[in-house]
Image: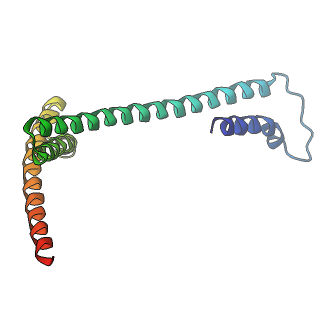
Amino acid sequence: MKSLFVFFCFLFLILSPALSQSGKEIAEPDEEFNLFLFTLAMIFVCAVIGAAIIGGLLAALVLFFLFALIAFGVLSTSVAIGLYRRSYSAGFKSFLIILFALSCAVVGTIGVSLVNIFFALELSRSMAAGVGFLSGAAGGVLMGFATYKVLQTLFKYFVTRLRLTR
């Protein structure tokens, strides 16, 4: 990727004088040597674009790293709860509750912030974020409990259904 970028920058610098002149006219000598300034400007533009690409990649890497840490924390907490209570279902239940609470808290924060912007509510940003986070987390906990109960019921149904067919 980097070598391709450098190749295109070099190719542009090489071809830019040929593209700037029309074929039949003879170019007059440039007293101010603007070609050198153009070359310096193109080097600067290439450096800025390269820095933006590298910055974007680093930001994506940091976000991926944070997501991986949060996911590992949720998973290890659920395993620890399951081992402490000596129950797979307790670990799975805690995993669902934590997962839904965190996910819905983020969605609630974004949702209330967007509602605050679009409908011109007179909430401060911190108030909108707090209300969205807490209401999203509460809804996520309820959704986690409901999902656990639905999955538990489906699991029991399929276990009994499979036992009847044997």
Q: Residue furthest front?
A: 166
- The N terminus: image quadrant: top right
User: Which quadrant holds residue 153?
Assistant: bottom left
* Residue found 47% across the figure and 34% down from its top: 56
Q: Position of residue 48 (x, y in %)?
A: 58, 28
Q: Position of residue 86 (x, y in %)?
A: 10, 40
Left or right: residue 153 versus residue 120 is: left
- The C terminus: image quadrant: bottom left
* Residue 122 visible in the shown view: no
What colour scheme was applied to this rendering of the protein? rainbow
Left or right: residue 85 versus residue 31 is: left
Q: Which is nearer the eye, 100 or 94? A: 94
Q: Residue furthest top?
A: 32
Q: As displayed, is residue 130 above or below residue 165?
A: above
Q: How many marks?
A: 0
* Residue 39 visible in the shown view: yes
Q: As displayed, is residue 142 above or below residue 72?
A: below
User: Which quadrant holds residue 106?
Assistant: top left
User: Which quadrant holds residue 147?
Assistant: bottom left
Q: As displayed, is residue 122 above or below residue 87?
A: above
Q: Which is nearer the eye, 34 or 157? A: 157
Left or right: residue 157 versus residue 34 is: left
Q: Which is nearer the eye, 91 or 54? A: 91
Q: Which is nearer the eye, 92 or 103? A: 92
* Residue found 19% across the figure and 38% down from its top: 79
* Residue found 55% across the figure and 28% down from its top: 51
Q: As displayed, is residue 151 above or below residue 70?
A: below
Q: Position of residue 110 (x, y in %)?
A: 22, 42
Q: Position of residue 6 (x, y in %)?
A: 69, 34
